[in-house]
Amino acid sequence: MSMKASTRQVDGVTIVDLSGRITLGEGSVVLRDTIKDLLGKGAKHILLNLGDVSYIDSSGIGELVSAFTSVQRQGGELKLLHLTKKVHDLLQITKLYTVFDVQEEEASAIQAFKK
Amino acid sequence: MTAQAKVSYRLESTLESVNKAEEMAGKLALQAGFDEDVRDGIAMAVREAMINAVLHGNAYDPGKRVNLSLEQNGRELIITVGDEGKGLEPEEVPDPLAPENLMKQSGRGIFLIRAFMDEVRFRKLEPGTEITLIKRIPGPELDRQEAST
């Protein structure tokens, strides 16, 4: 199953709804290109909705890290929303869970950008 | 695959081979009776070993192959992945959990393999590297053996 990314704007926050697998190859490229495109358009507040992401491999983890640091370098902020158990566990064992700002609800995640 | 069996493949250095190996490992783990979480971990470990072989070992070279074997002997799953690349020194791979490496984009593959498998061995080939992944199958037979030792 390939990965899809669609973006929408809510209260100044760009929400990226991802679905499928973020893995070496197409999935990682889709995420990388999406973030690059958003940064090019000046997006500063990016919320990655991973609720429909069924699987992430080490390449996908690397792409999330890269997205996080790229957005930070541009003076922006990236948060994660709706982690599945698999993705949650993976971020825990790689010690990245506390690095990312992980949100459980979309409305509160949007508010969190304003703090 | 029957209760005790071994299958071997000689695969091209492509992403399709990575996906195929991951799928076969998942099926083997299902047949061995592992629960979903463990099956996913085994499949991911095999995926990461295949990525190392295809991407870092053989560097997608169409002239180089990846040798994959999957074995189930009733007590454990044994999966080997061998590449024909320049070789890997596992002890030289930086710890991805170290603070200075935490935000690096790559370098988590071997860590994840070790996290999900019971035993991981590396062997130098001429040329290349072979990695062996072992997952013990919980069951009455194994429990009895462990109790007697």
Image: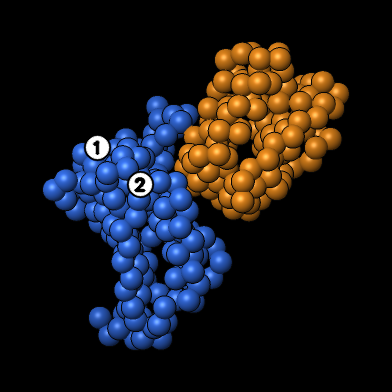
Chain colours: A orange, B blue
Question: Chain under label 2?
Answer: B
| Other residues around mark 1 within 10 Å, as few (<14) / some (14–19) / many (≥20) | few
Instruction: Say if labels 1 and 2 share a chain.
Output: yes
Q: Tell me, for residue B13, which label it has, or none.
A: 2
Which residue bears the numbered disc 1?
B92
Please tell me which residue is depicted at 21% across the width and 39% down the height of the picture: B86
Q: Nearer the viewer, residue B25 or B147?
A: B25
In the picture, which quadrant includes the C terminus of chain A? Answer: top right
Of residues A4 and B143, which is closer to you in this image?
Answer: A4
Q: Give the residue displayed 61% in from the left and 21% down from the top.
A: A36
Position of residue A59 in the picture relative to residue B88 (left or right): right
Q: Which of marks 1 and 2 is in front?
A: 2
- Residue drawn at x 71%, y 13% is A42
Measured from the top left, where is residue B119 in percent x and y? Answer: 31, 61
| Whether residue A100 can be seen here | no
Query: On the picture, is A15 further left or further right than B87?
Result: right
The one nearer the camera, A107 or B123, is: B123
**Element type where label 2 sits in the image:** loop
